[in-house]
Amino acid sequence: DAEITQSPRHKITETGRQVTLACHQTWNHNNMFWYRQDLGHGLRLIHYSYGVQDTNKGEVSDGYSVSRSNTEDLPLTLESAASSQTSVYFCASSEVRPGQRNTEAFFGQGTRLTVV
Amino acid sequence: GENVEQHPSTLSVQEGDSAVIKCTYSDSASNYFPWYKQELGKGPQLIIDIRSNVGEKKDQRIAVTLNKTAKHFSLHITETQPEDSAVYFCAAAKDSNYQLIWGAGTKLIIKP
């Protein structure tokens, strides 16, 4: 079955370190998204991609970067981890092409990141 | 930009009773309104969605209503069961950019 997987599931890192969270989907979806989830804020968009070599900033992109070198993967990098980036991170994908209507987004299980 | 507000933040209902969660949105151009359910330790999962050309949609015990004039939409769960306990999120999007703008979530507690 097609799926979307995130790794690691849990990560503890120190302030100032570079951290990369992996996201891999086998749906062959064009669109991929990274969100962070914090209590009282719901899901906030960090970065998104509509296809290979395409990346865009979301509402909370400062301190994060992504790259899309193939359809399956969208790794999220924290350039220099800060305590404010302690959160649960979710990756999602969807299959919507230009001109099509929005449809379901599929989410990974999440990565709990703690910056100490 | 779009803003989505969701109420209440916590809802506790007796098993078998109905639950209603409400959301309002600000951008009249939004035309896609999904509802996601998130169980503990998992990612959100779509349970029902509605488009702006429809006023109501039903799927077994769950239904969603949309009032475009007032810019609000609601999730209705009837005959609630213990497995309905979860956090529910509403969202809004425009077909032009595929980005979901999310409400803050409602924690639904079903009391036995």
Image (tube, coloured by chain):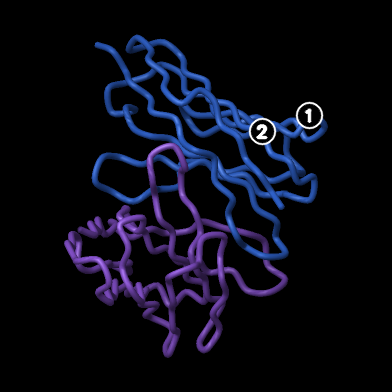
Image mark for residue B70: 1
- Which residue is outermost to the right? B69
Q: In the image, is residue A29 above or below residue B14?
A: below
- In this picture, residue A78 sits left or right of residue B53: left
Relative to the observer, which residue lies in front, B82 or A88? Answer: A88
Report the residue marked by disc 2.
B24
Q: What residue type is disc 1 on?
A: Ala
Question: Color used for chain A?
Answer: purple
Q: Quadrant of the C terminus of chain A?
A: bottom left
Relative to the observer, which residue lies in front, A56 or B34? Answer: A56
Q: In the image, is residue B27 above or below residue A51?
A: above
Residue contact at pointers 1 and 2, CB within 8 angstroms: yes
- In this picture, residue A19 sits left or right of residue A12: right
- Tell me residue B112's x, y (percent): 24, 11
Q: Quadrant of residue A115?
A: bottom left
- Tell me residue A18's x, y (percent): 28, 77
Q: In the image, is residue B50 above or below residue B29?
A: above
Question: Color used for chain B?
Answer: blue
